[in-house]
Image: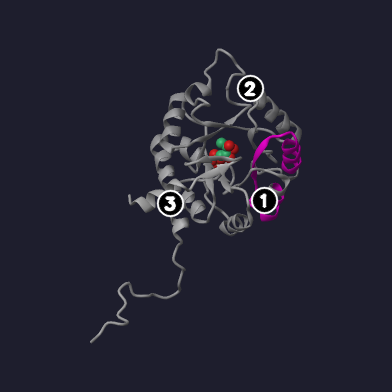
Amino acid sequence: MTALLHTALATDSLVVAGKPYSSRLLTGTGKFADLEQTRLATDAAGAQIVTVAIRRTNIGQNPGEPNLLDVLPPDRYTILPNTAGCYTADDAVRTCRLARELLDGHNLVKLEVLGDQKTLYPDVVQTLAAAETLVKDGFDVMVYTSDDPILAKRLEEIGCVAVMPLAAPIGSGLGIQNRYNLLEIVENAKVPIIVDAGVGTASDAAIAMELGCDGVLMNTAIAGAKDPVLMAHAMKLAVEAGRAAFKAGRIPRKRFASASSPIDGIIG
Ligand SMILES: CC(=O)[C@@H](O)[C@H](O)COP(=O)(O)O
C-alpha cells in the first residue's frame, strides 16, 4: 500500500459520540450457535461496536449463566445495548436505564421501538418519544428507524448521535430496498448514518457504503450464513471496499459506450 493510500484510509474513521472507530461494520450478537462462534465471527468482521439485546442476552443480569462479556470484553469492544423486543417508548427507556446500570454508567445505546411482530418495522411515533426522553436523560442514542428522510432529520435534530435506517425488514436479508431514500438521508445528515437491518450478503453492504452511508450494522446475514465466520470476513471486505469506492468517486453512468483506448489526438 502506498504511503498516501495508507494515510487516506487511516484517517477515515467513523466517529460516534466523539469516539473514533477504524471499523465501519457493526455486528449483532444474536442468532449464533454459541458464544465461541459469536467471538470468532465478531473477530473476523473486525467489528469494534457490537450490539446486544439487553432483554435476551446475559451481560451480568443472570449470574452463573454464560456471559457474553466474557467473550466480547468491554475493554476491547464498544458494547451497544439495544432495546430489541420493546414495543413502547416506556419499555425502551426502561431497558436503556437497566443497561446503564448493568454497564456501570455506560450511556451509548441503540434505540429500537418496534411496531408489530410481523414486520418488525419501527414504530416511529414511539421511537421519537423514546429518543426525546433518552437524549434529555443524557444517553447517546443511536436510533433504528425507517428509511424516511424527514424522520431521519427529525431524529438528528432531537440529538441522536447516529441515525440507523433499515435496508429492509430485520432478518429478511432482502438488501437495500430504497437506495434513493438512503441517499437523501445521507446527503442531509450531520450525524453518522448507519444502515441497520435487512442486509443479506456482501454486495448489499458494499452498496450501502457506496451510497455514502457511514457504516452498516448486521446480524442475521452473518449469524445465519452457512459459514458465519467466512461471511463475517466477506462483510468486512465489502464494507471496506464500498467505503473506498465512495471516497474514490464512481464514474458517471452513461447510456452509450465510450472506448477504453480513445484514438482522439493520435497523430497519423
Ligand atoms: C442485531 C440488531 O440490532 C438487529 O436489531 C438488527 O436490526 C439486525 O438486523 P439483521 O438481522 O437484519 O441484520
What kind of secondary structure does the magenta stretch mostly adopt?
helix
Q: Is mark 2 within 8 Å of ligand 1?
A: no
Secondary structure beneath label 2: helix
Q: Is mark 1 within 8 Å of ligand 1?
A: no
Q: Nearer the viewer, residue 208 or 84?
A: 208
Q: Residues within 10 Å of mark 3 (few under 14, many from 20)?
A: few
Q: Which residue is mark 1?
A: 152
Q: For this view, does 35 lie left or right of residue 146?
A: left
Q: Looking at the picture, how far across and down is residue 241, in whole percent? A: 42, 51
Q: Residue at x 46, y 51 (%)?
A: 243
Q: Nearer the viewer, residue 4 or 22?
A: 4
Q: For this view, does 250 lie left or right of residue 74?
A: left
Lower sequence index among marks 1 and 3 = 3
Q: Residue at x 47, y 42 (%)?
A: 22
Q: Is mark 3 within 8 Å of ligand 1?
A: no
* Above or below: residue 70 compared with residue 153: above
Lower sequence index among marks 3 and 2 = 3
Q: Looking at the picture, how far across and down is residue 70, in whole percent? A: 49, 21
Instruction: Name the disc covering residue 8, or none.
Output: 3
Q: Nearer the viewer, residue 132 or 31?
A: 132
- Would you say residue 224 is visible in this rendering? no
Q: Looking at the picture, how far across and down is residue 165, in whole percent? A: 61, 48
